[in-house]
Amino acid sequence: MIIAAHTVIFAEDAEQARAFFRDVLGLPNVDAGGGWLIFRAPPSELAVHPSEPSDSGRHSLYLVCDDINATMAELAVKGVSCSEVSDEGWGLLTSVRVPGAGTIGLYQAKHSLAHLIPD
């Protein structure tokens, strides 16, 4: 039986990226050995989007928030800058730079959230 999803972020500077998730986002974690941190992620959802053959196999990570402006303000206090917010129809979207690991999406959904469905 599947009990969890394990998301992997590949980073040129893994220590810097881990520090961001630990110290800036405050995600609880365990040390799997030698400083290799495994983070408890927020509740998650999985979406499957259609793609062109050239994009097949591409994957993305988005964090979901309930108030994008408040979340961006909280991140700004911690020295994190976000891109301008765009209205994508399905939600309000920005991107967040993860030191040593590129960017991830952050959005406030306009659609129902699957992680809120009762078991």
Image (cartoon, rainbow, N blue to C red):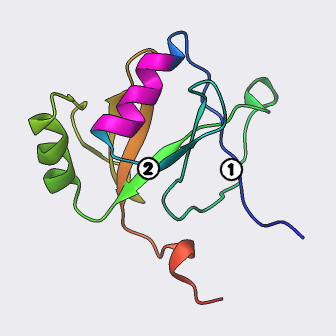
The residue closer to the viewer here, 54 or 5, is 5
Image quadrant of residue 51? top right
Camera-nearest residue between 60 and 9:
9
Q: CA distance from mark 2 to mark 1?
A: 17 Å
Question: Seen from this angle, which residue lies furthest front?
Answer: 34
Q: Which residues are magenta?
A: 15-23
Which residue is located at x 72 percent, y 47 percent?
A: 50
Quick one: SS at disc 2? strand
- Residue at the limit of the structure toward the top, as seen here: 12
**Residue 30 on image: x %, y %:** 56, 45
Which amino acid does the dot numbered 1 rest on? Answer: His
What residue is drawn where x is 39% and y is 27%? 19
Q: Which residue is mark 1?
A: 49
| Mark 2 closeness class: few <14, some 14–19, many ≥20 residues within 10 Å | some
Quadrant the C terminus occupies: bottom right
Report the residue marked by disc 2.
63
Q: Are marks 2 and 1 in contact (CB under 8 Å)?
A: no
Residue 44 location, quadrant: bottom right
- Please, is residue 117 above or below residue 26 in the view? below
Q: Secondary structure at mark 1?
A: loop
Task: Find out whether residue 19 is within the magenta segment.
Answer: yes
Residue 108: name its quadrant.
Answer: bottom left
Closer to the observer: label 2 or label 1? 2
Q: Please identify the quadrant where the N terminus is shown.
A: bottom right
Work out whether 24 lies above or below 88. Answer: above
